[in-house]
Amino acid sequence: MAERPPVNDWSSDFDHTDPRWVNDPYPIWDELRKKCPIAHTDRFNGVYFPSRHDDVRAVAYDPEHFSSRRVVVRETALPPVATPPITSDPPEHAPARRLLLPAFSPNAIKRLEPRTRQICAELIDRVVGRGECDAAIDYAQHIPVRVIAYMLGIPEEDGDQFRAWIHMSLEQGITDYEKAMQALGEISAYFRKEIGRRGDRRGDDLISFLLDAELDGRPLTEAHLLGTLRLLLVAGIDTTWSAIGASLWHLAQHPDDRTRLAADPALIPTAVEEFLRAYSPVTMAREVVKETDINGCPFKPGQMVFLSFPSANRDPAVFVDPDKVLIDRAENRHSAFGLGIHRCLGSNLARLELRVALEEWMRRIPDFSLRDPGAVTWSQGTVRGPRRLPVRFPLR
Amino acid sequence: MSAPLRVHIDRDRCQGHNRCFALAPELFEVDEYGYAKEIGDGFVPPGLEGKARLAVANCPEHAVTIVSTDS
């Protein structure tokens, strides 16, 4: 990747790929919330960064001025290739979303718990006798890949390929147009092959479901079908992997929290919400399509806006002691899964995976610590989470 | 004794985060799309007031409210 000019002023020239932002964005956002709550940069062809909860919410609730047709900030915009419903605006948004909601409802997702637990247990079986592992590489990254592969009815063994495509699209692809386009083409080709392989046969999987689904009484167009499949593959993997990894990163450094969760697993669901708040992985984006202003700040059409749910979730106007991670925080109105009509479709699935991943890990490896804090690396861009997380633990 | 509490979900605000359903399944139910509503007329049985307040305090969309039944 080409060297980028250093940032001297976060409020007027921020760069979300700057290593300081990638490694520890929270002090930067705290400063912005106090001094310049809606920051702007000319980089990436112009992007706004509202850091306060209320302003993030105002953007999320206003699809008329802030379109979802582009949801990733890139150096060079991709051609308009839809991945409905995440890239849909009203009125197309609601029917495209309604189609998928039943498959991700709490009651549908509950059925995936045994398989999720089995996946976690198998991954732990492989490392528990070693006394050390990489909690991101050996554990967290595999869980959502296998679960979504199971749901889509595609081979879990293709997981390495899926993760490579996500890296190309959402990380390298921020500044490398060719890589992003290559990933887009390869994922589409992969699903065309999967669809062809099914022929007229149908199974109890999401690809089969979408092949028979109808919108307005007609089958989905190939563009809609492939777009939705690309979304389902890409959206649920590095996001949940990041949330699991960040939770384990926290626990590795906080013995009191570890002891408490190991002794009282019933507290894990509450802790999960706090990890989601404090280490929210996903920053979405919108494109300004009509001039408007929020809090006196004008938003110019054609520019992008970050929807930083991670920063909103650290806003002291909404959360008491926002920088403290309190695993028993009872009142937690966080927006890690977004706000408004684009609330993460997979939030019930993500919560299930995160809870089960922590339950299984804490049951088998209740005591663990970072092997080398300096070796931990974080992903950049839309999704933030640990990509290397070496830990050690006593053999039992 | 104080009047019983009633919970209410504003269906226009609910986006299906399911926090209320997770925290207080005795008081809320979800439809096949994952949108929540209060069970029955929303009256909170004695002993569940704490759960009702938690559901309010954890809804990201401010869709859950406690309605006074005093009047």
Image (tube, helix red, strand yellow):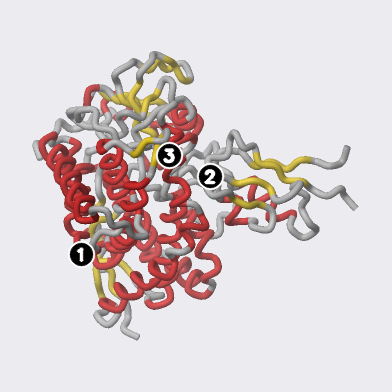
The chain carrying label 3 is: A
Badges 3 and 2, same chain: no
Q: CA distance from mark 3 to mark 2?
A: 12 Å
Q: Which residue is mark 2?
A: B16
Mark 1 belongs to chain: A
Which residue is drawn at the image coordinates 25% and 36% (left, top)? A223
The location of residue A378, given as percent across then percent down, is 26, 51
Q: Position of residue A341 (x, y in %)?
A: 47, 35
- Discs 3/2, front: 3
In the picture shown, does residue A131 fall above or below B4? below
Q: Label for residue A73?
A: none
Question: Mark 2 belongs to which amino acid?
Answer: Gly
Q: Amino acid at mark 1?
A: Glu
Number of numbered discs overlaid on the protein picture: 3
| Front residue of A184 and A52 | A184
Numbered label attached to residue A97: 3
Kind of element beneath mark 3: helix
